[in-house]
Image (cartoon, rainbow, N blue to C red):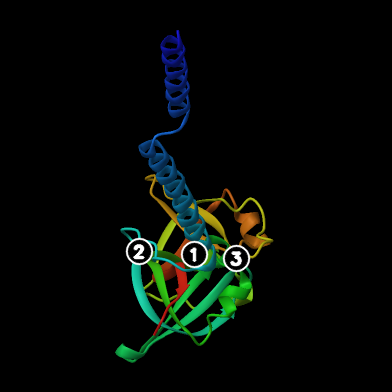
Amino acid sequence: MKKQIAVGFALIAAVLLIACQSEKPQSGERSELQTTAQTDSTADMQSAAHHSNSASGEGDLQEPAEDEIQEFGIIESIEDSGYPMFVVTVDFPDRQMKSTFNLNIEEIAMDMAALTALEGKYATIYYLSEMENDLNDLQVSGTSVLGEWAPEINPDWLHITGFLSGAEAETTGDLPGVITITDDTGNQIHFKYFITPEMVEANGTVVTAFYSYRNMETITYLRASEE
């Protein structure tokens, strides 16, 4: 009888021991959970650091687009030419030359404080170099609509005669409007210009535009850099 009781107690103890062991996580499971938690925490910290670097201007430069030209020089001066437009003069010491660029501050990721802080410092710039039509004079029946500002006609200027469009209203903002002249063959020439009341009056009539070409270099990306 005593032997049977002893065997019974032994069986109960064995069952309890097995149940306790099954409730404990295995060492492999604990290791996997810890690794996952550490990985998630590291990823979160790396993501936060990346966003912080982007906001503070740190990290890698963005890649220039195919039609953008990359340069590196000293921002010598920044002149207000009517907000949001600025004229930026850049000194290139290695080439002993200076160049001026147009900048529309509303088209780059930079505010006024950051822009003015670049003066006298090295910077990396990306810019576009494009040829634009430069309107020199606009005439109706041989009379310039520019009045006292009408220039003397240069024989080297190009000209087109056709219907004027796009001058429905006088320019009131800081950026020029765009006018178009369409000749009788359907050819069109576009000009950026601050539209005057005289141009509005001539809109829809036949005009002659005298123009030339000019090279426009416009900054699309600007960032402080180490010397």
At label 2, counting other C-alpha atoms closer than 10 Å, the crowd grade (few under 14, some 14-19, many 20 or more) is some
Between residue 9 and residue 74, name the one nearer to us.
9
Q: Is residue 180 above or below residue 83?
A: above
Q: Position of residue 146 (x, y in %)?
A: 60, 69
Can residue 150 be spotted in the picture?
no
Give the mark nearer the N terminus: 1 vs 2. Answer: 1
Label 1, label 3: how far apart the Cα atoms are: 53 Å
Residue carrying label 1: 53
Residue 172 appears in which quarter of the rendering? bottom right
Q: Position of residue 163 (x, y in %)?
A: 50, 50
Q: How many marks?
A: 3
Label 3, label 2: how far apart the Cα atoms are: 37 Å
Q: Residue at x 50, y 87 (%)?
A: 120
Q: Residue at x 44, y 25 (%)?
A: 17
Between residue 117 and residue 68, name the one nearer to us.
117
Lateral position of residue 116 relative to residue 37, left or right: right
At label 1, counting other C-alpha atoms closer than 10 Å, the crowd grade (few under 14, some 14-19, many 20 or more) is few
Q: Residue at x 63, y 75 (%)?
A: 113
For mark 3, give the secondary structure.
loop
Residue carrying label 2: 68
Q: For the residues carrying marks 1 and 3, which lies nearer the camera in this image?
A: 1
Q: Amino acid at mark 1?
A: Asn
Residue carrying label 3: 145
Q: Position of residue 130 (x, y in %)?
A: 37, 65
The quarter of the rendered structure image containing the C terminus is bottom left
Lateral position of residue 81 relative to residue 126, left or right: right
For mark 2, give the secondary structure.
loop
